[in-house]
Every structure is written in C-alpha cells, then in structure tokens.
Amino acid sequence: MSLKVAILISGGGSNMVTLADSMTGDHPARPCLVLSNNPDAGGVKKAQARGIPTAVVDHRPFGTDRAGFESQVQAALDRAAPDILCLAGFMRVLTPGFVDRWQGRMLNIHPSLLPRHKGLHTHARALEAGDAEHGCSVHLVTPELDDGPVLGQARIAVRAGDTPETLAARVLAEEHRLYPAVLRAFAEDMKTS
C-alpha cells in the first residue's frame, strides 16, 4: 500500500507539480491532497487537472489568529489522512504546536544552502554576501524556521553578472530535481522502518 502525501502550496505550484508527477510507477507514495492558503494559487488548478483532491484555507480572514487558521488546515489534513506533509512554496510560518504534530513527517524545500540564508530573499542575500555557490535544501521541518535536519542539497556556482532573478531560475531547476529525489528516498525509508 502506498504512503499518502499532502502538499501545501501558496502560489504557482511548480515544486508541487514535480512532486506529484514523480509519484507514479514503483514510487512508494501517492499525492492525496494539495492544500493552499491562497484561493488564487495557480497550483490549485494544476493539482485539479491531475485529479488530485484540493483544499483552500484562506489565511486572511483569520488575521493574527494563527491557531484558528492552523486548526482549519489540520481539519483538511485529517480528512485526507496523509503520512507525509510536503511544504512546497507554502508561505506561512507554522506554529510549534502544528509542527510538533507532524514531527519527523514534514518536509520543506528552501532556496539556499542551509544553514545559510534562512528566511526570505535568499538569492539577493547570497549575492550580497559574495557567496561563491548557492542552491537549495530539503529539510525536516522543526519549530525553528528553516532549521531542521537537512536531507539533501543541490549546489550551483554563482556566476559573475548573476542577479537574484537569474539565481532564482537556476536554483528552481535544481529544486525540481532535488525535492522528488529526497521525497522518494524519505518515503522508501518510512515504508521499510
């Protein structure tokens, strides 16, 4: 029996698409839900086009009530009963209470070589720091932002003349290779343990 994966998104869903499209054949997992906090996220339509169930929990009506928002997210997850949660461009910081519930089963992709450049604007910050290389990391989510154990990284050289936009485009291509590979290995380990 396949493990079930829920993917949380906020935008266009390009990483969600690569994850969903990778979960075929002898892959140990299948997508069971794509959830977005943004009703206008392009990734929702892409998931629906693939026949993946979707849910939207708009964070805006909750204002500063993060616990209220997360309880609605958790209710949607409870209905889908995933084994693994993948954050794929989900632009909400999750509370420790939510993260603890998914400890050891929630992955995130971050556009930097963690532990460098946690948080936002990673490509500009890599250039400002004069980094010779940049890339992306898949890590287990912990209550500390972008701080969990790193499960895989992909590296690119920073080129003379790079801008945040050129770096972002090259890193995204690496994300699309790295995240599916890490998810597959993670799911295989989960099935055998």
Image (cartoon, grey):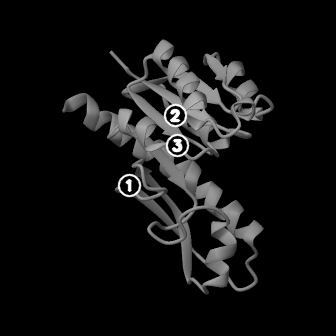
* The residue positioned farthest toward the left in the image shown: 193
Whether residue 21 appears in this view of the structure is no
Rendered image quadrant of residue 18: top right
Q: In the rendered image of this protein, does residue 103 appear above or below residue 126?
A: above
Q: Amino acid at mark 2?
A: Ser
Q: Are marks 3 and 2 in contact (CB under 8 Å)?
A: no
Tell me if 46 is positioned left or right of 88 in this view: right
Image point (49%, 52%), residue name: 178
Tell me if 161 is positioned left or right of 118 in this view: right
Sort mark 3 into few (<14), some (14-19) or many (20+) by Cα contacts within 10 Å: some
Tell me if 20 is positioned left or right of 54 in this view: left
* Mark 2, residue position: 22
* Helix, strand or loop status at disc 2: helix
Q: In the rendered image of this protein, does residue 162 appear above or below residue 27?
A: below
Residue 177: give x, y in percent of width and height: 53, 50
Q: Quadrant of the C terminus?
A: top left
Residue 40: give x, y in percent of width and height: 81, 31
Image point (67%, 83%), residue name: 128
* Mark 1, residue position: 148
* Helix, strand or loop status at disc 1: loop
Tag nearer the camera, 1 or 3: 3
Q: Are marks 1 and 2 in contact (CB under 8 Å)?
A: no
Sort mark 1 into few (<14), some (14-19) or many (20+) by Cα contacts within 10 Å: some
* Helix, strand or loop status at disc 3: loop
Q: Mark 1 and mark 2: span between their CA atoms?
A: 24 Å
Q: Which mark is residue 94?
A: 3
Q: Amino acid at mark 3?
A: Leu
* The residue positioned farthest toward the front in the image shown: 64
Tag nearer the camera, 3 or 2: 3
Whether residue 62 appears in this view of the structure is yes
